[in-house]
Amino acid sequence: SLKLCDWGYYQLVKTTADKIYGARDEAVVLTAYVMANSGYKLRMGRLGTDRLCLLLGTEDGVYDCLSVTIDGEDFYLFENTDCNSIYIMKKGFPNEDGINLSINKQQKFGYSPNSERTLVSEAYRNVSASVKTNRNMIDFYDTYPCPFRKEEPGTSWVYYANAPLDSEIQTTLYPTLKSAIAGKSQKEAANILLNFVQTAFEYKKDGEYWGYERPLFAAETLHYPYSDCEDRSILFSRLIRDLMNLDVVFLHYEGH
């Protein structure tokens, strides 16, 4: 009923298990049991000498996450640990498939609005919209790993760009933008959207704001006070597809 993607389903299962048992081995066992019986690929393991852990097999690669290759397949430990040893039970489970880290549908989380934010284009002052993001979606995105297509390293942006904007954001933002581009030529309409994306947000590099490289989902760019080039490219691609029904490609060229 929540239309959860695979990562959302895993978060639901893990959070439920942690709520029942706390951060103990029993929670890891329950999470593994539910995920395995739901058809997901996983392996049980032990961190050091006394703590169980769960590694998930994925259809995707994941940056900045401990991975182990078992029989030619990658499994990821989606938790932070300073343990210097891990022991893994290699036995698999019937009919298992790796989780897919794409978010292709709107997640039906409860709506808890963040503070309203007003965004104004510099060149087109009539393009002004007040937007409220959903705190539950922003919190969910904060748990999201950084995936890439295994056969195409450097493709993380596709995952972020293909995630749809929440219906609550579309309801408040899209009417203003649709009105601004109505009756305009394709080029002029695209430039109006481009100027909005380039000038309505304050720029800051990821290293300065986050301390590490972090692409943002379109909703996160609308939420956080700062964004950089790939964040705006992701938002721009979402607007171009939704409002102008055009295809987009990402270009990553030397130096940028």
Image (cartoon, rainbow, N blue to C red):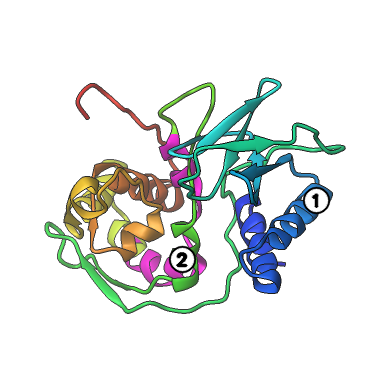
The residue to which callout 2 is attached is 139
Question: As displayed, is residue 196 above or below residue 132?
Answer: above
Foreground: 131 or 156? Answer: 156
Element type at marker 1? loop
Stretch in magenta: 156-177
The residue to which callout 1 is attached is 38
Prevailing SS of the magenta stretch: helix
Q: Amino acid at mark 1?
A: Ser
Foreground: 208 or 85? Answer: 85
Could you say where residue 140 lies in the image, as x and y percent from the top left?
A: 50, 62
Measure how far apart labels 2 and 1 are at the Cα level. Answer: 24 Å
N-term-proximal mark, 2 vs 1: 1
Q: Residues within 10 Å of mark 2 (few under 14, many from 20)?
A: few
Which quarter shows the C terminus? Answer: top left
Could you say where residue 178 lies in the image, as x and y percent from the top left?
A: 36, 61
Which quarter shows the N terminus? Answer: bottom right
Q: What residue appears at the point 31 percent right and 78 percent down from the top-left corner? A: 116
| Location of residue 11 (image quadrant) | bottom right
Answer left or right for 19 relative to 177.
right
Q: Residues within 10 Å of mark 1 (few under 14, many from 20)?
A: few
Element type at marker 2? helix
Is 22 a magenta residue?
no
Foreground: 188 or 26? Answer: 26
